[in-house]
Amino acid sequence: MIAGASIAFWISFHATVLIILLIDSFWLQRGEGQPSTRTSVLWTLLLVLLSLAFAGFLYWDRGHQAALEFISGYTIELSLSVDNLFVFLLLFKSFGLPPAAHRQALGWGVAGAILMRGLFIAAGVALLQRFIAVEYLFGAILLYAAVRLLLQKESHTQPAWTRWLVRRNRRGPSLFLLAVVSIEVTDLIFALDSVPAVIAVSHETFIIYTSNICAILGLRSLYFVLADMLHKLRLLHYGLGLILAFVGIKMLTSRWVEIPITISLAVIICILAIFTAASLILSRREAGSNG
């Protein structure tokens, strides 16, 4: 057993991840331009169904608690990933990358994110098991991230350090490399929020890791699904801020107040639904008034 699962499980899981990455890279992403919206939507839905099937396997193998923890972790990671896509979109525009380079840069970004998540999760769970105070530190980090999102007036702004990179490297073949590095660094910073958020709903390494990886696998296709409508989700960051605040408070008060995983999952889904719907309604009203 390694991190709560057998060696055979880890081999099977990572073999499946590798197959999905290969299909995504060499079949779905073939051609010169961006993949079609229809292809991206179908692939994203397939990955969601595969993740739900994995949750079903956990329900059969470990019971409803493990399955609900996986779905909660997956939902948190996927919803926070949408916020991260705002930054990616701004990065690509700033670096002036052509559409074909978007998918290549995202491909490297996904691969790097998988490696970094493994290291972050292993370190986070190990610290949590050895030092009780780390739980309060993680809770404080989540509350800080929540306040930061709630105080933002816009959905997202490009990090200052990437604007500096663009000014220093307006030309040359290094732009693609710098874009990839920017994505990796952005994801590293993003993991400081997302990993503690998932740890707040489960302390099992294998559930935290698998839920993160399943969500990250759909990041590239989700980008092409949402690229044209990200600007419409202008209120979503407020919802994400409330989710981070909720899981942060849950982590800080877990020793005195136990919130069932069913309640946590319901709260997260309701917040996402409300702020997504509000964003789309606001966008439609503004389009109607301008038209």
Image: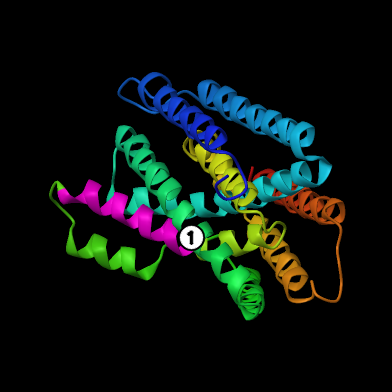
The quarter of the picture where the N terminus appears is top right
Q: Does residue 34 lie above or below 174 as drawn?
A: above
Local packing at callout 1 (Cα closer than 10 Å; few below 14, some 14-19, many 20+) is: some
- Residue at point 52% right, 27% down? 40
Residue situated in front as seen by the camera: 85 or 265? 265
Look at the image and name its color scheme. Answer: rainbow
* Residue 288 placement (x, y as % from top left): 69, 43
Q: Position of residue 90 (x, y in %)?
A: 41, 53
Amino acid on which the number 1 mark rests in the picture: Phe
- Looking at the image, which residue is at 80% across and 75% down? 255
The region drawn magenta spans 174-189
Query: Which residue does the image show at 53% across and 58% down from the upper left?
Result: 121
Q: Main secondary structure of the magenta part?
A: helix
Q: Nearer the viewer, residue 110 or 288?
A: 110
The residue identified by callout 1 is 120
Q: How many marks?
A: 1
Above or below, 28 against 75 in this view is above
163 lies left or right of 44: left
Q: Is residue 50 above or below residue 244?
A: above
Q: Quadrant of the C terminus?
A: top right
Q: Is residue 165 visible?
A: yes
Residue 88 position, x and y percent, is 43, 50
Name the residue: 58% across, 59% down. 194
Q: Is residue 187 magenta?
A: yes
Outermost residue toward the front in this view: 1
Which residue is farthest left? Answer: 172
Instruction: Indicate yes or no whether the magenta region holds residue 22.
Output: no
Which image quarter: residue 150? bottom right
Does the image show residue 289?
no
Q: Position of residue 17 (x, y in %)?
A: 48, 32
- State the SS at label 1: helix
